[in-house]
């Protein structure tokens, strides 16, 4: 897992019906974008140091999640 300042950290809900939790990465404290991350949680504004587990993912804001190669023609 690698993140940059401004990315969004998303933690998937652990139980059925439990919402995902997300926050903005304020600081990357590991080398080469690796954890831990200082995160401001969107639900309560709390800022904390996070060592993400396997239920976490990084969303790069402003960058498409999937890019279509130029050689693919869409009718």
Image (cartoon, helix red, strand yellow):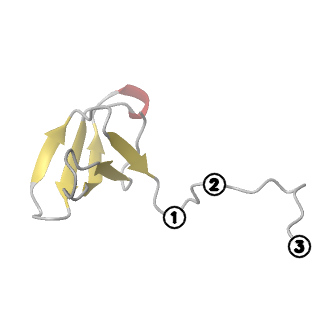
Q: In the rendered structure, which disc, 1 or 3, sits on the residue that comes first in sequence? A: 1
* Crowd band around label 1 with a 10 angstrom C-alpha radius: few (<14), some (14–19), many (20+): few
- What residue sits right under mark 1 in the picture? 62
Cα separation between marks 1 and 3: 26 Å
- 59 vs 64, left or right, is left
Disc 3 to disc 2, C-alpha distance: 18 Å
Query: Neighbour class for label 2 at 10 Å: few (<14), some, many (≥20)?
Result: few
**Residue that extends furthest to the bottom in the rendered view of this protein:** 75
Left or right placement of residue 52 versus residue 75 in this view:
left
Q: Residue 27: percent from the left, percent from the top?
A: 27, 45
- Circles 2 and 1 in contact, beta carbons < 8 Å: no
Mark-to-mark CA distance, 2 and 1: 12 Å
Q: Quadrant of the C terminus?
A: bottom right
Image vertical order of residue 27 relative to residue 17, above or below: above
Residue located at (12% from left, 63% from top): 45
Q: Nearer the viewer, mark 1 or mark 3?
A: 3
Q: Earlier in the sequence, mark 3 or mark 2?
A: 2
Return the residue at label 2.
66
Residue 8, how many percent across, how many down? Answer: 35, 55
Above or below, comparing residue 49 to residue 61 in the picture: above
**Is disc 3 surrounded by few (<14), some (14 to 19) or many (20+) residues within 10 Å?**
few
Q: Are marks 1 and 3 in contact (CB under 8 Å)?
A: no
Q: Which residue is mark 3?
A: 75
Q: Position of residue 58 (x, y in %)?
A: 40, 46
Quarter-of-image position of residue 22: bottom left
For image coordinates 46% across by 61% down, the residue present is 61
Q: Secondary structure at mark 2?
A: loop
Q: Residue at x 21, y 44 (%)?
A: 14
Foreground residue among 40 and 58: 58
The structure residue drawn at horizontal position 18% and vertical position 56%, both measured from the top left corner, is 18
Viewed as shown, does residue 19 lie left or right of 46? right
């Amino acid at each position: 897992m690698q993140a940059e300042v401004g990315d969004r950290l998303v933690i998937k809900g652990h139980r059925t019906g439990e919402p995902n939790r997300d926050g903005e990465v304020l600081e990357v404290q590991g080398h080469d974008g690796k954890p831990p991350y200082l995160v401001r949680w969107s639900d309560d504004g709390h800022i904390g140091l996070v060592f993400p587990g396997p239920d976490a993912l990084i969303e790069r804001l402003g960058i498409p999640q999937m890019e279509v190669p130029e050689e693919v023609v869409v009718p």
